[in-house]
Image: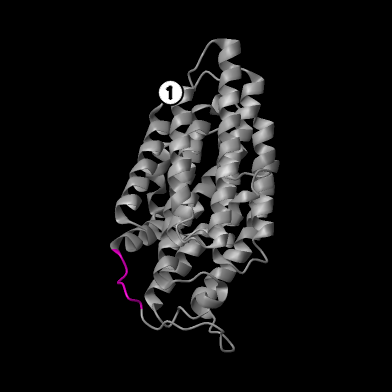
């Protein structure tokens, strides 16, 4: 892709995100989301592969439908209350439509079908953007309207997302699809606590972005797209693969790594809100995700392929490991000792 075109799309992504997260009027928030959608589509389809074109079309159709629902929700609310302020979402129908629209934007169950397919058709760097940056504006809208949302609906969608994200990721061999179902599962954790502690949802999202960014950048460096290619990458970059294993275990939420912190705090907050049943269910469902994270970690460092693989082995990495990967990997694994400061901020 032309560097100037790539710069234009990247700046448009930044602009769209900035407009949405800084707006307090529904029309401005909608405009930012639309700019984001139009800017990411060329980045999805830049390889001109039929699967990439299909992913771009699926992404456009789903996001257009979600934006329509969001606009419809805000117009109904403005019709009944006379308010275009995002924080003044008082009408129950508007609240329901907004929840559906944001669930479509994020890929929450039952609006999750597009997300694994789009991620599978995108390049690794674009898949990283779809999993992290593109989720920030919808999460911000949920944060601003959290006091108006339906707790029962959100809890149901959250538990369903955690269950389906873990269950569907079990038999996948494509790494991007595994990370897509991982994203759906983590969104369940963010949604279940949104009404009771919105700041905790944001903190969980930031930590998730850090870990996912580290994983996607590492996979992009080693050019690993499937489990079979992942098994041969150990000989190329042993240290990078070791950090990848640690980051995957952190994403699974194992102590004493960073990923344990949000799950611990969410379960603690749910217990305070007398939602012990929901906390128990979502904690048990995270064991499903743990299985495929462990399988990825096992393939990344411990397993050597038992027979010759049917792809060309690349024994040298042309580019050195970037400082960004090192920083994100460090933050993804070693931030748990900072949890007292995090608790003070929340």
Residue 318 falls inside the magenta stretch: yes
40 or 241, which is in the foreground?
40
Residue 330 falls left or right of residue 50: left
Q: Main secondary structure of the magenta part?
A: loop
Secondary structure, mark 1, is: loop
Quick check: 255 left or right of 278? left
- Residue nearest the viewer, comparing 6 with 271: 6
Count how many numbered circles sit on residues in the image. 1
Which residue is pictured at 51% across the width and 63% down the height? 249
Over which residues does the magenta segment extend? 317-322
Residue 338: x and y in percent read 38, 50
Residue 267: % across, % down: 58, 44
* On-image quarter of the N terminus: bottom left
Which residue lies under the disc numbered 1?
24
| Horizontal and vertical percent position of residue 149 | 61, 27
Q: Quadrant of residue 214?
A: bottom left
């Amino acid at each position: 892709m032309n560097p100037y075109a790539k710069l234009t799309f990247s700046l448009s992504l930044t602009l769209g995100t900035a407009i949405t997260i800084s707006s307090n009027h529904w029309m401005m928030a909608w405009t930012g989301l639309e700019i984001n959608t139009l800017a990411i589509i060329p980045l999805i389809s830049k390889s001109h592969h039929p699967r990439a074109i299909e992913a771009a079309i699926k992404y456009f159709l789903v996001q257009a439908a979600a934006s329509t629902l969001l606009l419809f929700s805000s117009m109904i609310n403005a019709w009944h209350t006379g308010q275009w302020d995002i924080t003044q979402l008082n009408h129950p129908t508007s609240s329901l439509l907004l929840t559906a629209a944001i669930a479509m934007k994020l890929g929450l169950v039952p609006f999750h079908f597009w997300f694994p397919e789009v991620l599978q058709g995108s390049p690794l760097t674009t898949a990283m953007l779809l999993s992290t940056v593109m989720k920030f504006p919808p999460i911000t809208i949920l944060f601003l309207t959290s006091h108006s949302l339906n707790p029962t609906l959100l809890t149901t969608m959250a538990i369903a997302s955690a269950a389906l994200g873990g269950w569907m990721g079990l038999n996948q061999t494509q790494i991007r699809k595994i990370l897509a179902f991982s994203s759906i599962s983590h969104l369940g954790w963010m949604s279940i606590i949104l009404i009771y502690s919105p700041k905790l949802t944001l903190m969980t999202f930031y930590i998730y972005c850090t870990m996912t960014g580290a994983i996607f950048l590492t996979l992009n460096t080693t050019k690993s797209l499937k489990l079979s290619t992942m098994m041969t990458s150990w000989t190329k970059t042993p240290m990078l693969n070791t950090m990848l294993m640690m980051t995957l275990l952190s994403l699974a939420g194992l102590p004493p790594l960073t990923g344990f912190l949000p799950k611990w705090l969410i379960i603690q907050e749910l217990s305070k809100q007398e939602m012990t049943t929901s906390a128990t269910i979502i904690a048990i469902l995270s064991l499903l995700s743990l299985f495929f994270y462990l399988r990825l970690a096992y393939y990344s460092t411990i397993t050597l392929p038992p027979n010759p693989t049917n792809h060309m082995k690349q024994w040298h990495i042309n580019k050195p490991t970037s400082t960004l990967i090192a920083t994100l990997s460090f933050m993804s694994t070693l931030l748990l000792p900072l949890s007292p400061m995090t608790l003070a901020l929340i």
